[in-house]
Image (cartoon, rainbow, N blue to C red):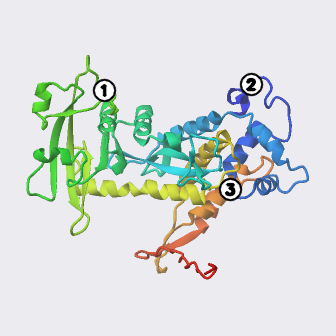
Amino acid sequence: MDSCHWLFTKNPNTDFSRKKKWSFEDVMKFIITMEGKSLKDELLEYFDFNNDTPSNSSFNQRRDQILPEAFEFLFREFTDFYSTKSITYKNFRLLACDGSDLCIAHNPNDETTYFQSLPGTKGFNQLHLNALYDLCARTYVNAIIQPARLENENRAMCELIDSYKGIKNTIFIADRGFENYNIFAHIEQTGAFYLIRAKDLLSNGIVASMKKQLPKDKKIFDAEVSITLTRKQTNEVKANPDKYRIIMKATAFDYLDLYCNQFYEMKMRIVRFPISEDTYECIITNLPQDIFSAEEIKRLYHMRWGIETSFRELKYAIGLTSFHSKKTEYIKQEIWARLILYNFCEIITTSVVVHQKTTRKHLYQLNYTRAIRICCYFISLKKEKAPPDVEYLISRELLPVRTGRSDPRKVKHQSAISFLYRVA
């Protein structure tokens, strides 16, 4: 990218044309390795506390010359190269889709990101990150950034599915908010599979609308159902509510119209299993019963939690909660940079073998936070310095795995407000 940097700058003829303290490569590497410290501290560390350390202003002027799409391009190129070697589960690639809110600098003038809970309060601004995550390789495959006011997770997932170019033996796994006919259809059209949690039988979702096709008087079942979707409201359609499902005009469904594609037949499998004595979960999928049993479906859905823990690592270990700018354009640069850094660190750490000693009381795992610091140093290293043995350093940073431990939520107590200040 540095050899053809004009493709990624706002003014190709002038940006980075002269040799200065900041090269295109340095700006990119610096943004990727930034942590949660102040910008000046980050600059001093990156330039080894040199007397010629650039100023904050010079950095901001240089980063302004780079398009946000440059980091997105780097993310896709790096991720696509590695995904050819992705790990599978029974020859199926497992991709989880979910979203997470990102708080950004306060700006009441930005109507697309600003929220105000009560009149007179300060309010806050947010962006929404929609991500596609490989559960086995533990890397992000793709992402879409939306202003929180314009957030649409269902539409974002459809776009992520359509842009996916991986193997057909892929299972898209999502939580209850993605229970949507349009998402099911988009996945079917790619020849892939879906496994999505739905609202329970006693609720008002898709499963409840198919009660007549499901086993009666059974709390636990694994049943195949079929439905024909349409936007037509003829007498035949209205007379057969068990066979047809009317998709209203305001509801998004990309494979129906009133002329050429009037009907869309969909076959699905609904699995209901208990999670406690009186609580049940429903999964809608198109996975074949002869390959994936109900117990296997339950296990696959449980693996979806990997994307939730990845968001935690991305925000608090990688530093996605600490932005070094107020401009949305710069923030998007940093979001893509954090995704690149996360994938790089995961790829490195998965290659490190932890040798378990039988004399130890616990099993040991890698200290991921320490591994990130080592990887950041490796990326930011200047060419004249010899690189460290990254894998060896990471392998020495271990933490014991203590199963069965739980840390209770630390809720801060709220003190009572005295009324003694009132005048009688």
Q: Is residue 41 above or below residue 131?
A: below
Image coordinates for residue 291, horizontal then vertical, percent: 22, 47
Q: Position of residue 246 (x, y in %)?
A: 22, 32
Is residue 135 visible to us here? yes
Q: Residue at x 10, y 32 (%)?
A: 239
Amino acid identity at mark 1: Tyr
Of callouts 3 and 1, the N-terminal one: 3
Camera-nearest residue between 258 and 276? 258
Determine which residue is flagged by label 3.
Answer: 35
> Looking at the figure, which quarter contains the C terminus?
bottom right
Q: Which mark is residue 255?
A: 1
Q: Amino acid at mark 2?
A: Pro
Q: Quadrant of residue 2?
A: top right
Q: Are marks 2 and 1 in contact (CB under 8 Å)?
A: no
The label on residue 12 is 2
Where's residue 302, x and y in %? 34, 58
